[in-house]
Image (spheres, helix red, strand yellow):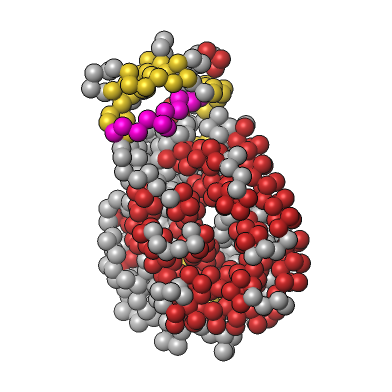
Amino acid sequence: MHTEPAEQFSGPFYLCSEEDGAPVYEGEITSTAGCSQGIISAVSVCDFSSWETPGRYFVSIPGVGGSPVFSVQKEAACDHPAEEILHFFRSQRCGVATPLHGPCHQHDGSKEHPLTGGWHDAGDYLKFVVTTSFVTIEMLSAVLAKNSTETRLAASVLREARVGVEWLLKMTDGYADGRFYYQVGHPDDHRFWRLPEADRTGQEYLRTAYAGWGKNLNGLAIAVFSMAARAFVEDDPDFAACCGTRAEKLWELRDSFPDVQNTTPESFYTQSDSKDSMLLGAVQLYILTGREELLPVVDNLLKTVENYNIGWGNVGFLALITAFEAGIDRSFCTEVLQGCVENLAKVAKRSPFCRASELVWGSSAQIAADAQKILLYEECTGDRTFRSLAIAQVDYLLGANPWGVSFVVGVGCKYPRFAHSQLNDLAGLQRGAVVGGPGLRRDWEKFLSLPAGYTDVYGPYQGAEVFYDWIGDYYTNEVAIDYAVPLLAVFTLLQ
Ligand SMILES: [Zn+2]
């Protein structure tokens, strides 16, 4: 970063060995963009991706100076962060001992409907059908997109996905008496900072099971079980068959629910309609069963979905990809998919860091989802025009951003040390956790203000966009299962 005018940054750069300072690689600065974020006034790209010799290096630009020293390593670029993210998911598991906590919440639900299992949602210990379903869909989608569980990574992702599938089977186990559950947790969850195994009061069934269901959740659940029926068919045919049966049951009941069931309180995760999730559910069930009568429903939903994203609030893009794969109206799907990806490229042009979407609460999830969209689009169409844009999103998440920080705990040289996570604070570094990531200052200030005397190590780099490695920051620095899963999907796809 520099204070000189942006146009001065062109010409050669050198990759130099730390040992003797000698240049080992010469390249040209490929682009420079103006930037007004803290003390950063311009961003230049020095691309030395082709240099693979392990060692410790720095980048030198004549007339400007040298960068901090960094290392180039041989280890697989995708395996390491993906394994770390899986470590995060294991630490979020509920009801069992994990490397970071003891057995917890073993009596969730009731004797009639035990709801133990699944993952804690974020830095808190609540459990939601909406986020768990999205996470499980992402995991299964990544495994199925690889079309095999042959790679070690895909096999590990499938194992973790089973945690979500098994818990969702419990949450939807009451179809005989109409008792479906959308959430589990204690209403006072956010009042106490503790390890999850501390939730013991002597009552056998401690945490509230929230009964209720909506088409939004039903579509997601149908998708989960239809995908699980395919993904587990070789490893565990009985389990796969059970999932397939549940998908069919939920489909039969589709008209008996209101359109949307939101969380309690509603502000945690608010959805406005069910079209995208019902579309994904219907297409996945069609792929599983081949039932022709599903096609008119799919076709109708395909044309009425208004937003095509990948996130807990909208799975429209995943639904389009799935429809394409199923051979349904490919010209329509291709046109919409291409429009989505071209739009990402348009937004990225405005960002000095090539970020393809505007900042939101949970930007990390959206940025990874953007990379995932491009990679899925590539697999469908064979068009690799946007590959570098996908990689730029991953780069942004791992450090090519104004703060020079990786938003994945334990990955990279500089990453959040004080994530808003009780486990990270009380039990040790929660490796692989993906924090929310940067937000717009004007949005952040609606929720939070820094405590008096707080020393912000990223102070010089804060501007209209902010990121704080502060334990109290649940906006930019909280961990969450739905933040981590799109990046896991990306690394699985890149493998
Ligand atoms: Zn728990």
Does the magenta run of residues contain 51?
yes
Q: In this orientation, which residue lies closer to the viewer: 321 or 462?
A: 321
Q: Position of residue 52 (x, y in %)?
A: 35, 33
Q: Quadrant of residue 426?
A: bottom left
Any part of residue 71 in sight: no
Left or right? Give the position of 419 relative to 376.
left
Any part of residue 435 in sight: yes
Q: Position of residue 480 (x, y in %)?
A: 45, 56
Residue at point 42%, 40% (across, down): 398
Q: Which quarter shows the N terminus?
A: top left
Q: Quadrant of residue 23?
A: top left
In the picture as drawn, the residue positioned furthest to the top comes out as: 63
Residue at point 34%, 57% (across, down): 87
Which SS type dominates the magenta stretch?
A: loop
Left or right? Give the position of 365 relative to 301.
left
Q: Position of residue 313 (x, y in %)?
A: 60, 59
Residue at point 27%, 31% (across, down): 55
Q: Position of residue 169 (x, y in %)?
A: 49, 78
Does the magenta run of residues contain 467?
no
Left or right? Give the position of 424 relative to 190.
left
Q: Quadrant of residue 400?
A: top left
Q: Is residue 194 above or below residue 337?
A: below
Q: In this orientation, which residue lies closer to the viewer: 185 or 175?
A: 175
Residue at point 71%, 76% (across, down): 292
In the picture as drawn, the residue positioned furthest to the left comes out as: 19
**For the magenta stretch, what is the residue range?**
43-54
